[in-house]
Image: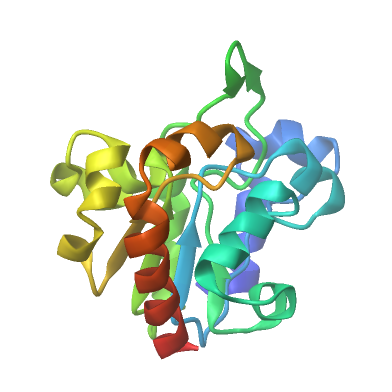
């Protein structure tokens, strides 16, 4: 199935009808030439409203960590964005709700079939890490991210770049000194 047909199927899926009826389109980006896929949780309200993923302070920090410009991030066909849910899932008591169960399992394989050159998955946050690493997930986001080298060259686990994680970043200085330079090197090798 080609990407346009998948996009139409996502919009027509009964699971997504509440969004489609409100004229909210699925938010992701795929390219046949993609070498890197960034997997996050789901679009936030700002991303959904502007139809531009990672359009917030988290996105700014993610681009800094990757060592890429806004233009590269949004326009280079070697980068793809596949959140675990293509729609904002809503708000919970302590932040955004998790991605809907089964959503990524249903749509990611179809979209990835059309991206045969992918060499790297950047797994942003614990939901992405658990989904893609499965049993290899080290039990916590911190441990999985700290042991990032064990997942290379295919996967690169990261903490979420949200400003809410400033305390985590202060408590784990190895992230900035070890993980970020390694990420930038790996990304540069593919772009």
Q: Position of residue 61 (x, y in %)?
A: 62, 56
In the picture shown, does residue 48 fall above or below 93?
below
Colour approach in the figure: rainbow
Residue 125 appears in view: yes
Identify the residue at image location x=39%, y=80%: 185
Q: Is residue 15 left or right of residue 54?
A: left
In the picture shown, does residue 99 fall above or below 178?
above
Q: Position of residue 18 (x, y in %)?
A: 73, 31
| Residue nearer the viewer, 142 or 49 | 142
In the picture shown, does residue 12 fall above or below 164?
below
Q: How many marks?
A: 0
Identify the residue at image location x=62%, y=39%: 163
Identify the residue at image location x=55%, y=43%: 85
Q: Position of residue 16 (x, y in %)?
A: 65, 38
Q: Quadrant of residue 168?
A: top left
| Residue nearer the viewer, 13 or 36 | 36
| Residue nearer the viewer, 100 or 74 | 74
Q: Position of residue 172 (x, y in %)?
A: 36, 42
- Toward the top, the furthest residue is 93
In the picture shown, does residue 183 fall above or below 164?
below
Q: Quadrant of residue 30?
A: bottom right
Q: Is residue 25 left or right of residue 162?
A: right
Identify the residue at image location x=54%, y=84%: 78
């Amino acid at each position: 199935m080609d990407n346009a047909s998948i996009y139409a199927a996502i919009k027509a899926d009964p699971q997504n009808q509440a969004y489609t009826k409100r004229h909210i389109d699925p938010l992701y980006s795929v390219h046949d030439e993609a070498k890197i896929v960034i997997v996050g949780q789901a679009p936030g309200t700002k991303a959904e409203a502007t139809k531009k993923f990672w359009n917030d302070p988290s996105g700014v920090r993610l681009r800094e960590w990757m060592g890429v410009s806004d233009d590269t991030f949004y326009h280079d066909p070697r980068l793809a964005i596949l959140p675990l849910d293509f729609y904002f899932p809503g708000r919970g008591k302590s932040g955004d709700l998790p991605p809907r169960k089964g959503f990524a399992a249903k749509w990611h394989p179809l979209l990835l079939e059309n991206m045969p050159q992918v060499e790297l998955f950047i797994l942003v946050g614990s939901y992405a890490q658990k989904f893609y690493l499965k049993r290899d997930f080290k039990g916590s986001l911190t441990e999985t991210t700290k042991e990032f080298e064990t997942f290379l060259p295919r996967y690169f686990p990261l903490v979420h770049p949200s400003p809410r994680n400033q305390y985590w970043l202060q408590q784990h200085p190895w992230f900035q000194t070890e993980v970020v330079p390694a990420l930038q090197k790996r990304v540069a090798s593919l772009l």
